[in-house]
């Protein structure tokens, strides 16, 4: 039997994976005080984001509270990567990390997925559905 998760459950999983993956990376030898911030940003966007937002291209109806939870987890990871206190201004943290809000990341992933579907050869069923 296949279990189908709701968008709320997907957001819960994504939030816990965002924080958990980032904290495990930083607690297992990658020190924010000794590493270059560009290295931390590269690790975040190549390891943490794909793991946490896997399948986000198919999330259809996210509520404002779901987006707020995702954004809080994203901000927490960015602040922890820079060794900033949680009370540090969020815009400053995102700007110095070179990051964008999590909603922009999800929308970008959706657009990339749509582009991949549009470039499929006509023999595939999913091409006929687009």
Image (spheres, rainbow, N blue to C red):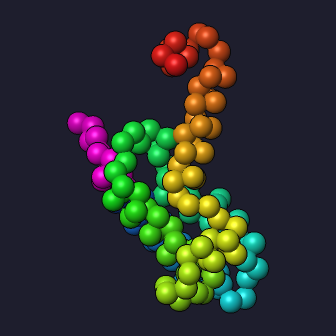
Q: Is residue 127 above or below residue 74?
A: above
Q: Is residue 65 visible?
A: yes
Name the residue: 36% across, 55% down: 64
Q: Which residues make up the magenta segment?
A: 1-11
Position of 2 compared to 33: left or right? left
Position of 12 compared to 108: left or right? left
Q: How far across and how far down the image is residue 39, in percent?
A: 74, 72
Q: Which residue is more in the foreground, 68 or 17?
A: 68
Name the residue: 55% across, 76% down: 90
Q: How far across and how far down the image is residue 36, in percent?
A: 76, 79
Q: Which image quadrant is residue 4 in? A: top left
Name the residue: 29% across, 45% down: 5
Q: Which residue is more in the foreground, 14 or 60?
A: 60
Q: How far across and how far down the image is residue 93, in percent?
A: 62, 77
Q: Which of the image's four quarters has the N terminus?
A: top left
Position of 116 compared to 103: left or right? right
Q: Is residue 43 visible?
A: no
Q: Is residue 113 above or below residue 76?
A: above
Q: How far across and how far down the image is residue 33, in percent?
A: 68, 89
Q: Is residue 66 above or below residue 30?
A: above
């Amino acid at each position: 039997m296949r279990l189908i998760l709701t968008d709320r459950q997907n957001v819960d999983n994504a939030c816990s994976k965002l924080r958990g993956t980032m904290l495990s990376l930083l607690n297992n030898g990658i020190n924010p005080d000794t590493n270059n911030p560009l290295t931390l940003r590269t690790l975040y966007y190549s390891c943490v984001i794909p793991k946490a937002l896997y399948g986000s291209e198919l999330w259809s109806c996210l509520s404002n509270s779901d987006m707020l939870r995702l954004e809080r987890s994203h901000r927490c990871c960015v602040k922890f990567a820079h060794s900033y206190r949680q009370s540090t201004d969020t815009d400053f943290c995102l700007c110095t990390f070179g990051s964008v809000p999590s909603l922009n990341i999800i929308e970008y992933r959706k657009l990339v997925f749509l582009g991949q579907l549009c470039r499929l050869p006509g023999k595939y069923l999913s091409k006929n559905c687009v």
